[in-house]
């Protein structure tokens, strides 16, 4: 509300902070969803859900720190961006790392066998 192009010419950083915040907030939510989905796919849904909830709570706690006056608006946005970037890197690492575990669905190898041929009998 009240955002105009004139405001950008006066104080560009403060005017563009909402866009900066939305960019990193959306990226953070995608990354946390990816982490929770990774855990669900690996059969460890609950621990990864708790991890996602704790990470989300940490981001939400930034608003408490801001309201208390410990961080300024710009500092809060920088911390949010850094935290979101770290969570995104963690989600990408989980996605692209090589699994050293056994696959969740073991592949059964079937050895070829010789067909049963009935023995010839003399008539």
Image (tube, rainbow, N blue to C red):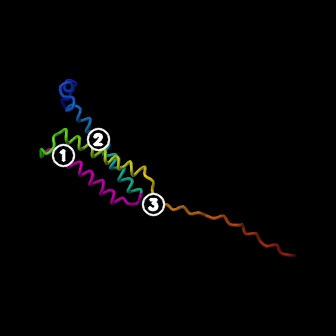
Q: Which residues are magenta?
A: 42-67
* Residue count near mark 2 (Cα–Cα under 10 Å), binned few <14, some 14–19, many ≥20: many
Q: Which mark is residue 112?
A: none
Among the 4 quarters of the image, the one containing residue 11: top left
Give the alpha-carbon distance from disc 1 to disc 2, as whole Å.
15 Å
Q: Earlier in the sequence, mark 1 or mark 2?
A: 2
Q: Quadrant of the N terminus?
A: top left
Q: Write down the residue under mark 1.
A: 63
Towards the viewer: 117 or 104:
104
* Most distant residue in the right direction: 123
Give the alpha-carbon distance from disc 1 to disc 3, as whole Å.
39 Å
Q: Write down the residue under mark 3.
A: 101
Among the 4 quarters of the image, the one containing residue 121: bottom right
Mark 2 or 3: in front is 3
Element marked by disc 2: helix
In this rendering, would 78 be left or right of 69?
right
Q: Write down the residue under mark 2.
A: 24
């Amino acid at each position: 509300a009240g955002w105009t192009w004139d405001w950008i010419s006066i104080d560009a950083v403060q005017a563009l902070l909402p866009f900066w915040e939305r960019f990193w907030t959306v990226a953070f939510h995608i990354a946390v969803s990816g982490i929770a989905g990774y855990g669900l796919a690996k059969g460890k849904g609950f621990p990864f859900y708790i991890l996602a909830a704790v990470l989300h709570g940490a981001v939400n706690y930034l608003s408490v720190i801001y309201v208390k006056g410990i961080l300024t608006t710009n500092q809060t946005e920088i911390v949010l961006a850094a935290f979101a970037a770290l969570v995104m890197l963690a989600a990408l690492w989980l996605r692209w790392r090589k699994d050293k575990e056994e696959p969740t669905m073991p592949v059964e190898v079937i050895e070829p066998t010789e067909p049963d041929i009935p023995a010839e009998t003399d008539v």
